[in-house]
Image (cartoon, rainbow, N blue to C red):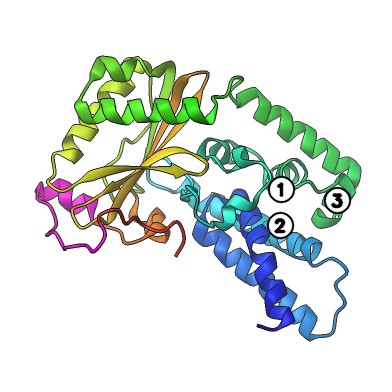
Amino acid sequence: MTDRERLLDELRPGAFALAYRMLGSVSEAEDVVQEALLRVHRALEAGERIASPRAFVATVTTRLAINELRSARARRERYVGEWLPEPVITDGRDDPARHAEIADSLSLAMLVLLESLSPEQRAVLLLHDVFDYGYPEVAGILGTSEGNVRQLASRARRHVQQRRPRFRATREQRDELAARFFAAAERGDLAGLEALLAHDVALTGDGGGKVPAIARAVRGRARVARTVLSWVRRVLALPGVSLRPVELNGGPGALLLDAQQRLIGVCALDIAGGEITGIRGLVNPDKLRHLGPVGDLASLLRSGRPAPVVPRVEATGSPEGRP
């Protein structure tokens, strides 16, 4: 490996961490990072002296992500049903998204919240509050004044703080609550499930018009508990379908696998104050392909029959968090 290749390899994780948080999409983030690193390579090939490769790639990545986010938002307005970010598995694997300083910025809840900011506000908040760039550096990256950056940061921070949970759970509390949730769901324990949910809990599904999913968010402890049990009962009744708990985007979640151990859905939980405040289910296959082999949940639900079982070498194998 040449020095230049080593440099690009070192820059990739940080660039991906930024691009993914900007876009909420693994595929879009990878495209942005590829283009950003290509520009670094071309600049070096042309003999350009780059004083800070990290700042250079952050600048290119941010500006490309802002442009991509503007066009992506137009596409998301035409999206069928609720739009949710693409999840990443973060349970101990060497995933580039884990290299950010603040894990909370990776959660699906935070990525959804960031969607309500303007592209510039999102960039400023991430660069300054998550990736520790100073205001002058952020101003240079965005090509604007430091005063404007401070205003953008203040507005973005105020917007986020108003909507973030005030009380967060420890990892131990979170994992214990998630284990109880999935156990109650699999048992069909309605009362046990309701006891774990916040009174204003929200259930959101993303099927992208390709797999049946709830069209709008369901809210309220009783309604959410009944909806979850109805869906779990229907899906787990399919022979060979199983749930596998994992860490998704730094929080508790589970993979839904078919009889061939192909991924057919993911579930992520938002937990705060000792309660489950949000449940997000993604079954759109286009948002799952980066996690591993994907099955056909829509077909399974239509037929009620499982895909043929293929013998596996390891019963504990799981889809990878990255391609």
Query: Depth check: 110 or 236 in front?
Result: 236
* Residue 310 belongs to the span the image colors magenta: yes
First of labels 1, 2 by sequence position: 2
Q: Position of residue 34 (x, y in %)?
A: 61, 70
Q: Quadrant of residue 163?
A: top right
Could one spot residue 99 in this view of the protein? yes
Q: Residue at x 51, y 57 (%)?
A: 26
253 relative position to 154: left or right: left
Q: Amino acid at mark 1?
A: Ala
Label 3 sits on a secondary structure element that is: helix
Residues at marks 1 and 2 touching, judged by CB atoms closer than 8 Å = yes
Q: Quadrant of the C terminus?
A: bottom left
| Amino acid type indicated by mark 3 | Ala
Location of mark 1 (residue): 123
Counting residues from the start of the chain, the first of labels 3 and 2 encountered is 2
Q: Earlier in the sequence, mark 3 or mark 1?
A: 1
* Magenta span: 296-314
Q: Is residue 214 above or below residue 306?
A: above
Q: CA distance from mark 3 to mark 1?
A: 11 Å
Tell me how far mark 1 sits from mark 2, CA to CA.
Answer: 7 Å
Name the residue tied to disc 3.
Answer: 139
> In this rendering, is residue 315 above or below 200?
below
Q: Is 299 displayed left or right of 97 in the figure?
A: left
Q: Secondary structure at mark 1?
A: helix
Q: Residue at x 25, y 22 (%)?
A: 226
Q: Nearer the viewer, residue 114 or 166?
A: 166
Residue 178: % across, % down:
39, 30
The N terminus sits in image quarter? bottom right
- In the rendering, at what x and y percent does residue 284 appear? 35, 50
**Label 3 to label 2: alpha-carbon separation:** 12 Å
Q: Which residue is mark 2?
A: 62
Amino acid of disc 2: Thr
